Amino acid sequence: MSTKQSAIIVGAGPRLSFALARKFGEGLGEVALISRTGDRLATLVEELNGLGVAGHGFVADAADLNALGAAVRKATAAMSPLKVLIYNAAIVRPCRPLELDPANLVNELIVDAVAPLAAAQIVTPVLEANGGGSVLFTGGWFGTSPSAEMAALSAGKAALRNLTATLAQDLEPKGIRTAVVTISDFLADKGRFGADAVAESFWELHTSRSGERGFELTYA
């Protein structure tokens, strides 16, 4: 009988998302990446498979909630029992508040805060049926220390942080570890803020017992 489990990572890039995919793919047995860019996605999956990690790719733009939902459901159906959802997508666009088009703010908030909620809502019954798991989000210091130069991202990360706090109240009693990792500096090539080290903190959150830690891990 197979003991493989799986993780879904929304947002695919060569740094943190790839490090997360490798860590959770190795630890659980299987991982799916969801990204709006098909070519980059195919490259990352090929690299994972070359490392011996069973990787899958699904194309969807997090700004399109219907497409994202379909991709999450397809990934869930295609893999071993789901244990982890990691949301690592965001729009990073410098803009001061007086210059920020309200329509653009709405679009960025969809990616930064609404889509994570939508994905969590989809996987919750699956994780509960599978005996629990984890819903983890990538936060950032703009969520607690807003910058006028990054007005939309500051609003989005603050919304995500507060959403996680409330979501944890619903999911933790179901045995679903719920947390945001607030990364307090820029990613580096190596060292404390290297992608592999940050990915390890996500894994430690997943493997900690539900209720053992708070809803936020400040990675400093």
Image (tube, rainbow, N blue to C red):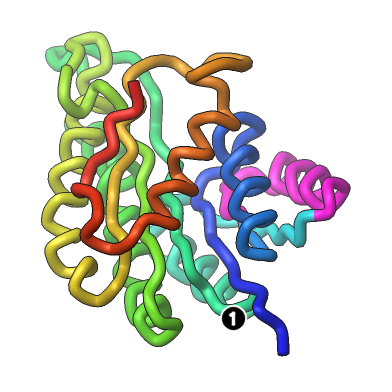
Which amino acid does the dot numbered 1 rest on?
Ala
Q: Quadrant of the N terminus?
A: bottom right
Is 39 within the magenta?
yes
Which residue is tagged 1? Answer: 77
Q: Position of residue 27 (x, y in %)?
A: 63, 57
Mark yes or no: residue 101 visible.
no
Looking at the image, the residue that sits furthest to the bottom is: 1
Q: Residue at x 58, y 74 (%)?
A: 74
- The correct choice, above or below, for 141 with respect to 174 in the image is above
Does residue 3 appear to the left or right of 109 in the view shown? right
Q: Residue at x 58, y 48 (%)?
A: 35
Q: Main secondary structure of the magenta part?
A: helix
Q: Residue at x 24, y 34 (%)?
A: 157
Q: Quadrant of the C terminus?
A: top left
Q: Position of residue 152 (x, y in %)?
A: 24, 26
Q: Residue at x 62, y 63 (%)?
A: 28
Towards the viewer: 158 or 84: 84
- Number of numbered discs overlaid on the protein picture: 1
Q: Indicate the secondary structure of the residue bearing disc 1.
A: helix
Q: Position of residue 201 (x, y in %)?
A: 44, 39
Q: Position of residue 133 (x, y in %)?
A: 40, 68
Q: Which residues are magenta?
A: 33-52
- The correct choice, above or below, for 209 with respect to 44 in the image is below
